[in-house]
Amino acid sequence: MRPKSAICCGVLALSMTTLKGGELTVMTYNIWVGLNETNELQRQVDLITAAGADIVGLQERGSTGAQAIAEALGFEYQVLGGSTAVLSRFPIVGAFGDGVEIDLGSGNSAFMFDVHLAPYPYQPYDFRDGLITTELEAISGAIATRGAAIGNVLNQMTTAIGSGMPTFLVGDFNEPSHLDWTQEAADEGLHFTKVAWPTSTSVVNAGMTDAYRDVHPDPVARPGDTWTPRPEPNEVHDRIDRVYFAGHDVTVTGAILIGEPGGPDVDLASNGVFPSDHRAVAATFTVPFDILRVDRNPMGDLNQDGVVDALDWAILSLYQHSDLSALSLNEAYLAGDLNADKRNDHLDFRLFKEVFDAARGQGAFDAMLATIPEPSSLAALLAGAAIGGRRRRRAS
């Protein structure tokens, strides 16, 4: 984790940082209904800078919040759906639905998705108010409130997660985590009961890891509540702002809570009144720098000639079920490892077929197979493709 900025002489002592040695800091921050008189621009900028954030997912950006903060930071920004936006120290090279692709330099990309899910009905309040009393009621209510929305986002993320590239999902989920509402936490009186909250469960089941809970695994010792730093009577405090990550060899090295001075579990405090009704979270990751940018050469273009065709299928077939563990990620990719797990197996076959049909039309893959007779012509095609693939292979 980058050193925390100190508070001195009444102002934040700030230091801008850049990506070095594959280190990347990702932040999620609900800035509370845009920028207003109690939520001025400079305090927002100071906190983001003090956290050393490289990529920030904003929620409740307001009409001008994303642009104003990005310009003050010298970042790029992309407004997404609803109240969300992504700010980035690095170029944003693509936008789609609830996410963006970010160019980290040296031919490396990351994907960032940002959500602000429906706040009501809020099931922890329903517990408090006696409207529900059981785990099943909470799960049912949460699915009805946010299930379709998180399902849509995870569908958008399928290719990004499958690529093995650094992929992040951040946001104000407006729902607790199943990693927090455990039986142990309920026994300690932190929560009403154990609940396997469906939104966090579905994100983890999709292959993502909760960065804060990975660094701070005990929800009793370190609840990390983000809702809310503001004093409210009869409030239910919880960790509803989270940073998730996925990607081959992507590891989290630190996660901090950003909030008001003296707040519970707060690692980085504002100078004076914290300018939001949500605490923010920043997590630092190490990311590998030897994965091909698949947007520059289409995913599945194993011979790097700019198209996905039968020659690429020949290469994937040639190396299928081979041991790729000794290869770099670049080399393994060019041998058919499309999901960066150092294997060329059925998952890579399925990915290749999907990409082939997406590029050439539904059923194109099966039609291509029908034109390749067995076995002699296929053997010749494989040999030619293998030679071409080896000739074009780049070192990582």
Image: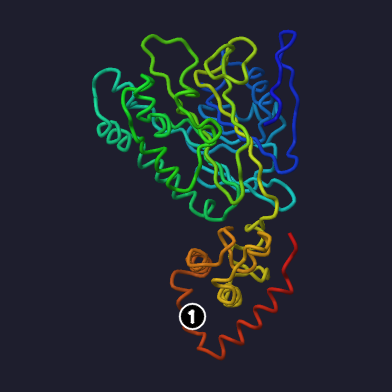
- Helix, strand or loop at disc 1? helix
Q: Quadrant of the N terminus?
A: top right
| Mark 1 residue crowding within 10 angstroms, few (<14) / some (14–19) / many (20+) | few
221 vs 99: above or below: above
Placement of 204 over or under 159, stated as above or below: above
Q: Position of residue 293 (x, y in %)?
A: 66, 56
Residue located at (49% from left, 63% from top):
347
Taking 234 as reference, is 348 left or right? right
Residue visible at 53% across and 47% down? 96
Q: Mark 1 = which residue?
A: 369
Total tally of numbered discs in the picture:
1
Which residue, as the protein is rendered here, is positioned at the far bottom? 376
Where residue 126 appears, as percent x and y from the top left, is 29, 23
**Image position of 343 with respect to 130: above or below:** below
* Residue 42 coordinates in the image, percent (x, y): 67, 18
Q: What residue type is labelled 1?
A: Leu
Pick whichever, 70 or 185, lies toward us. 185
What is the quadrant of residue 134 in the picture? top left
Question: How has the structure been colored for display?
Answer: rainbow
**Where residue 354 sits: x, y (%)?**
48, 65
- Residue 120 lies in quadrant: top left
Quadrant of residue 67 in the image? top right
Looking at the image, which residue is at 48% across and 13% down? 230
Q: Residue at x 68, y 20 (%)?
A: 46
- Where does the C terminus fall, quadrant-wise? bottom right
